[in-house]
Amino acid sequence: CLGYSISYGGAKDVFEQYVARTLLFQQMEVDPENSDIYVFVGDYHYNEKAYDKAVAAYENVILIDNKNIHALNNLAWLLATCPDENFRDAPRALELASQAVLLKRESFVLDTYAEALAINKRKTEAIAAAKEALSLAQEKRAYYRDQVARFEKMDP
């Protein structure tokens, strides 16, 4: 039965992605000025491993709204940690993460900032940012503790 396949079988993920993509792109047509929607587009492309499209989406948000914390943070994360090293850009990641952390000192932003500092070989500052992220974290504290430990083990 198709309903079973969509609800519980292998078709569920494909169906959910189709619905999410359809709703997202329809919403963009309805509200093209909402920069947060374009962040979701970037996130969608990132999750699909279409990194070039994700970068373009995040860059477009930043052009429209250079204080969009999620676009700054997510693009910095992509440029600092992308599995495809062709998309890594340490100086740009740090530039974006620095802008984001000036706007909002929250755990997720500080975590990205720590990653950007680390790939720019600024270990001491990366550890400090990771410790601040942990101190502010309300959730995922084990993750942030692991991040501190990982940065502390890095070569100087």
Image (cartoon, grey):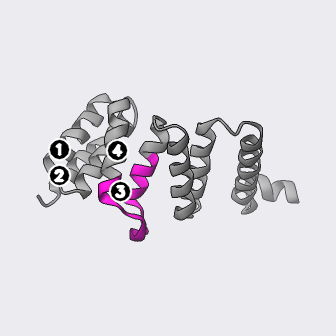
Q: Position of residue 4 (x, y in %)?
A: 82, 55
Q: Which residues are magenta?
A: 74-92
As measured in the structure, the alpha-carbon distance from the residue carrying label 2 to the one carrying label 4 is 14 Å
Label 1 close to label 2 by CB (< 8 Å)? yes
Closest to the observer, 54 or 2: 54
Q: Position of residue 11 (x, y in %)?
A: 75, 61
Mark 2 neighbour density, 10 Å: few (under 14) some (14–19) many (20 or more): some
Residue assigned mark 4: 97
Q: Can residue 137 be seen from the camera position used here?
A: no
N-term-proximal mark, 1 vs 4: 4
Residue assigned mark 3: 80
Instruction: Examine the image and state in which quarter residue 39 appears.
Output: top right
Closest to the observer, 122 or 59: 59
**For the N terminus, which image quadrant?**
bottom right
Query: Which of the labelled discs sits on residue 125, or is there none?
Result: 1
Q: Residue at x 37, y 30 (%)?
A: 103
Q: In the image, is residue 19 above or below residue 128?
A: below
- Label 2 sits on what residue type? Arg
Label 3 close to label 4 by CB (< 8 Å)? yes
Our reading of the magenta stretch's main secondary structure is: helix
Q: Residue at x 23, y 53 (%)?
A: 118
Find numbered disc 4 in the image and state the secondary structure of the residue it sits on. Answer: helix
Q: Position of residue 46 (x, y in %)?
A: 54, 57
Mark 4 neighbour density, 10 Å: few (under 14) some (14–19) many (20 or more): many
As measured in the structure, the alpha-carbon distance from the residue carrying label 2 to the one carrying label 3 is 13 Å
Find numbered disc 3 in the image and state the secondary structure of the residue it sits on. Answer: helix
Q: Residue at x 52, y 44 (%)?
A: 63
Residue assigned mark 2: 122
Mark 3 neighbour density, 10 Å: few (under 14) some (14–19) many (20 or more): many
- Label 4 sits on what residue type? Ala
Q: In the image, is residue 8 above or below residue 100?
A: below
